[in-house]
Amino acid sequence: MEEDEEKPQSLILQIKPEENEKEESQTSISAEQMISETVGEAYERRELACISDPYTNLQPNTDEDYPESSEIDPESSHFVTKKRTRRLKVDVLTMLQDISAENSDGGQIEEFEDDEVSDPTFSPDSSSSSSDYDEPEKRPRLHAAGESRLANNPVSSEPSVDGPAVTASLDSCHIETAKDGTVWTPVEPKATGGRSQSQNIHTEKEGLTPYSCHNIRDPLTAFVCLMDRVMLQDICDCTIAEAHRCGEKKWELSIAELRAFIALLLARGVHNRRDTGVEGLWSKEWGVPFFTSTMSRNRFRDIMRFLRFDQKHTRCTRLSNDKFALVRNVWDRLIQNSLASFKPGAEVTIYEQLFPTKSRCPFTQFMPKKTFKFGIKFWLAVDVDTKYIFNGYPYLGKDPSHPTTQRLGEDVVLTLMEPALGEGRNVTTDGIFTSLHLAHTLLEKNTSLLGIITKNKISLPLSVHQKAHIYDTKVMLSERATLTIYQRKERKSVCILSTMHKSVEIIEGPKKKPSTVQYYNRTRKAVDILDKTLQQFSSRAATRRWPVAVFYNILDIAALNAWVLYRSCVDSKITRRAFILELCQELRVEHVLCSSIPISSSLPTVLITGKRRSCTIRRKCAKNKTSKTCVKCLQPVCGQCTVRAYSVCMNCE
């Protein structure tokens, strides 16, 4: 016995080689490692069983699982027989069955201090005593050679994107954590009633403002609310300055004539003559009579040639800070008037517009999925019910001064929604804008968000990549946000992030669409209708100057918004085509009357008897000879210095 005690307390297992092998291999492992291997194999079998069926109880291993492959070393005082090895494994597995299901699926291992080894021959002084299991969570489990590490890397029950579809019940679902730490909890899709959330209660009166209600009487006054006299006067001054710079010192342009010029641009779009040249529009045989009766062809060409929207002598300074400086004043004035004339409703959509043009521009965009692949991109905020554009600005490319930590999509939405925040509105966005951080930011400003979110966001759970059966819906919650995963096609699913819906309802129908998807389709459909409406009667035409292309877009937006204002205030049944045609007639009235109205009988022209005199006004002439005098100041005035059909000089006007 003394000799046996001096020998190391170890187990020597000799593995039998095959009959045709001559040499024998011996493997020596300690009792502690053997117990660890046994526990590891038990955990492995337990987890594989839980993966296949989490509610199936494990059964102890039989003798068939352990073939007779070991022999006893007679030189060792402490040896383990074949039967004892099997009994030990059975006892370990029986002990694991008594552990709760929570701990057996990855929880902490219970302490085994009170458990006793059933084998009376097992020495309490060996290295595999129960004291080794006092704090098992602090000691990593040892793996035997060739053992798979399933205990540390459990097999996921969720299929991959390319894997087969899995229909999992809510009982087998579990809470998921995204890469950024966001916790998502699966819930059952169902309809729940109750009070509306605070971010869904619209508190501001929508529609026309007192300013627009007081001024709108006809299509012209509705249009003037958006393109007012201040804007038109600024365009006239810049155009005249360009003409004088080019050597036309006597060239002038009045607001009435500029309005007639705008009428011709709008009429060209209504009659679908955007691709027709100037000669064709003024042709006596094939032209449109409206053009010839409004303005001469050469005068139209001169205005188009000198048309400018900024002063050139200050352009270099402004271009250093703003790429859009050539038309910035006119665009900002349009947005300012649009906000002052109308208040959006409870539903707003962020719209990405690509105005088609191939003119030379430093921020021209190429978008292959659009109908017109080249153009200038605008971010627009649109009221869903009326299709009214109340805010917008152009995309000028990557801004070096823009913080790299600030996302472009979030910055666009917050900028466009700034005048409409805090009033309980909901904003619908596309995939390039939507993010969980943006949703939380808008919630702080009492505004909800709903939109498609791309699957590569780190705030989303990994189950968004899971392939499901067609028309299946999975709903998950995270704080105040709801995520809907809808399998719309066999290989395509869509993710909708919403802070507007606290619960999701499945709409009855063949496609079983959830309520969030149905709401998104309805609000985005309004934007698609708006895009087609702008293109249908657009005033755009071929041009080499991008400020003129932007001016065409300004006219289209102003005409559309004026139509919405007129319908809300006066006539709700007038079509857009009829509205634009009536607007064109009213825009040119003043200019036509000034050039062709007969002399009024109440203000007769005073004729100079005898020799003609030189014009004393000399604002548009160089002492022209005339036989007429002004009816107010009775000074000689020539035809170029006359502003009305009856002779009234510019000084008296």
Image (cartoon, rainbow, N blue to C red):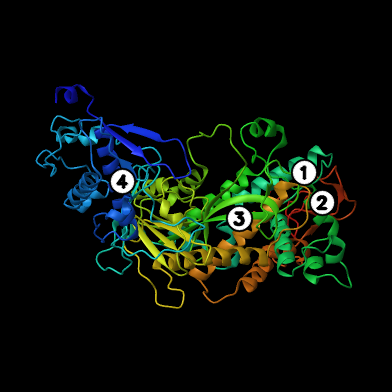
Determine crowd level at label 3: few under 14, some 14-19, many 20+ residues with C-alpha closer than 10 A: some
Mark 2 vs 3, N-terminal side:
2
Labels 2, 1: front one: 2
C-alpha separation, residue under disc 2 versus residue under disc 1: 20 Å
C-alpha separation, residue under disc 3 versus residue under disc 1: 45 Å
Mark 3 vs 1, N-terminal side:
3
Mark 1 vs 4, N-terminal side:
4
Mark 2 vs 1, N-terminal side:
2
Labels 4, 2: front one: 4
Which residue is at a point 31% across and 46% down the rendered structure image? 41
Q: Closer to the camera, 507 or 202?
A: 507
- Per the rendering, the mark at residue 41 is 4
What amino acid does circle 2 point to?
Asp
Residue 604 lies in quadrant: bottom right
Position of 406 with respect to 580 (left or right) is left
What amino acid does circle 4 point to?
Glu
Determine crowd level at label 1: few under 14, some 14-19, many 20+ residues with C-alpha closer than 10 A: some
Q: Closer to the camera, 359 or 105?
A: 105
Residue on which disc 2 sits: 302
Determine crowd level at label 4: few under 14, some 14-19, many 20+ residues with C-alpha closer than 10 A: many
Residue on which disc 1 sits: 619
In the displayed structure, 582 sits above or below 238; it is below
C-alpha separation, residue under disc 1 versus residue under disc 4: 104 Å
Residue on which disc 3 sits: 353
Q: Position of residue 31 (x, y in %)?
A: 24, 34
Disc 3 on helix, strand or loop?
A: strand
